[in-house]
Image (tube, rainbow, N blue to C red):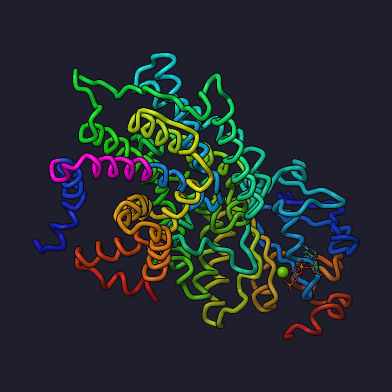
Amino acid sequence: MALLETKKLGINFDGLVALEDVDFAAEEGKITAVIGPNGAGKTTFFNLVAGFYTPTEGSVHFGGKDITRLKAYQRAEIGIARTFQNINLFKDMSVMDNALVGLHSRAKSNVVSSMLRTPAQRREEKALREEVMSYLEFMGLADCAQEKAGSLSYGMQKNLEIVRALALRPKVLLLDEPASGLNTQDLDELSGRITNIRDRGITVVLIEHKMDVVMSISDRIAVLNVGRKIADGTPEEVRSSREVIEAYLGKEDE
Amino acid sequence: MTFGKIYEKTRIWILLIIAAILPFAVTNNYWLHILNIGGIFAICTLSLNLLTGCTGLFSVGHIAFYGIGSYTAAVLSVKCGVPFLIAVPCAGIMALIFGLVLGMPALRLKGLYLAISTLAFGEIAYRVFLNWESVTNGTRGILGIQAPVFFGINFRSYNTYYYIVLIFLVMTVVLTRNLIYSRTGRALLAIRESEIAAQALGVNTVGYKIIAFAASSFFAGIAGALYAYEVHMIAPESFVSTESITVLAMMVVGGIGSISGSIAGAFVLTMIPEVLRSTGDIRLVLYGAAIVAIVIFAPRGLGGALEWLDHLLMGNHKKKVREEE
Ligand SMILES: Nc1ncnc2c1ncn2[C@@H]1O[C@H](COP(=O)(O)OP(=O)(O)OP(=O)(O)O)[C@@H](O)[C@H]1O
Ligand SMILES: [Mg+2]
């Protein structure tokens, strides 16, 4: 069953059509890749799904419900997590605190219980920290939990983006180019982690330019080109589609 | 046990003991008054720090909430005979309500626009204090605010009222500190760092900005109430816009986002003009120069300098070096 779906989704910015008529479905528990040349509208697609842009046409559905009207934070609450292509961390906060913000909507303590540090609040805080630690360990960041996020290396910052999103306990995880800027060794590690995340039951939607990563871990692939979906299917199907080869694969290594 | 360890374990108590015996060392009434004002402004600066330092919402009208608290306490006390322990929280709540009134529409605004609207709010509040004669007595102000009496002790003299200010300051520090290191505080800091990322992680940014406004104006209102009981008479000129700038300066000099810094900034900037009193007209120039000097020589504010000293005394300045790079 499709957990996340868009129907005839489109948006234009002052007349410039960035995305048009996109029917997309991400199967529950699968990795679905979204690929396409630069400027194809992939990030715009994520922004529409995550609620940062309002579509000019079409709708977004999640678990069978129309969520087109929900605000970004409400979509996060119901289990849609995303990472940012241009790293968007809380730079002056510690790695730990960055990850803890991810658990925000899963925690209950409020202003008053926080100020008074009630026993319930303290218990919750301890549990949150333990949970976050497990995500940090999973992404290899446990040793720098107390460092400032801004002081981490590029690769580690990319990993922290994923930790933060995982802390949301998402049903679907939108990854926007997690592999960009990583070296070959880190790439294998990342691929392993993404499949691991899927095996935990989290649906993954992956934007990625690195074709070896996409082809090796994706269950399905959708291809965007100049704002339109031009193909979708299994990696084999997409790889052999003429339209895709013309639009995209020809200039894979740009 | 090393010196560093002992220091780390006892520093809070040492600080509290020094604070507790200070009125015995400072016997000059005038300086006790300055100390009390410093403590009251420290509460006000801590409250601004929640809003501007932690959440990144610029307010240049903060003294309005302080003034609202001050007038609320004064009116309740003088005109209605309400006791101190009820008047002070009421002052905080009244300021909080106005914080919500300002916060809700103002939050649609960003950056400079928000700053300007808070400035306008401060100006409006001042005009109301000035012109709403039937309640505020206009320029004449409200006189005869009686000092609180507990257990038969009258807290009228500066060296007794000092302890009331100290208790409120300590409470404010504990509460705001707890807040900053909690789910709510992290949400506020996240908003300051990146609103987009905060939303992506499920933070209702509008809701939390309103919370920041409410909490911040509440503590400012409490500070204002304490001020009313310190000086026994209040008048509009204590709540002019330049006072908002003074509080902002205290926060910046202290170090944005720092609790110890806000306190240090408030005390230092309250005292500098008094120390310079003998210099006459050049006083304001020296005051400005002092602020500039602090900002230049302590880029992370007085709070940053205190933190550095703290690490040095604890003996783990290695950690510090790593943080600097
Ligand atoms: N907020 C915006 N305002 C105006 N135009 C926008 C906005 N966001 C995206 N666009 C335009 O939409 C088009 C698609 O951009 P998008 O960032 O989605 O591409 P992409 O597929 O993610 O590319 P890349 O692979 O380089 O990340 C571009 O032409 C871009 O200029
Ligand atoms: Mg993109």
Residue A232 visible (yes or no): yes
Q: Is residue A186 above or below residue B258?
A: below
Residue A109 visible (yes or no): no
In the displayed orientation, state which residue is furthest to the top: B80
What residue do we see at 35% from left, 59% from top? B303
What residue do we see at 44% from left, 68% from top? A140
Q: Which residues are magenta?
A: B24-42
Q: Is residue B28 magenta?
A: yes
Frontmost residue, A62 versus B209: B209
Frontmost residue, A194 versus B246: B246
Frontmost residue, A106 versus B300: B300
Q: Is residue A245 above or below residue B219?
A: below
In which quadrant of the rendered image does the C terminus of chain B lie?
bottom left
Query: Which SS type dominates the magenta stretch?
Result: helix
Image location of residue A93, percent across then percent down? 45, 60
Image location of residue B120, percent across then percent down? 63, 43
Would you say B319 lies left or right of A10 here? left
Image location of residue A17, percent across then percent down? 88, 63
- The count of marks equals 0
In the displayed orientation, state which residue is furthest to the front: B280
In the displayed orientation, state which residue is furthest to the left: B1
Q: Is residue A107 above or below residue A13?
A: above
Image location of residue B103, percent across then percent down? 60, 39
Q: Is residue B154 magenta?
A: no
What residue do we see at 23% from left, 30% from top? B157
Q: Quadrant of residue B313?
A: bottom left
- Report the image quarter containing ligand 2: bottom right
In which quadrant of the rendered image does the N terminus of chain B lie?
bottom left
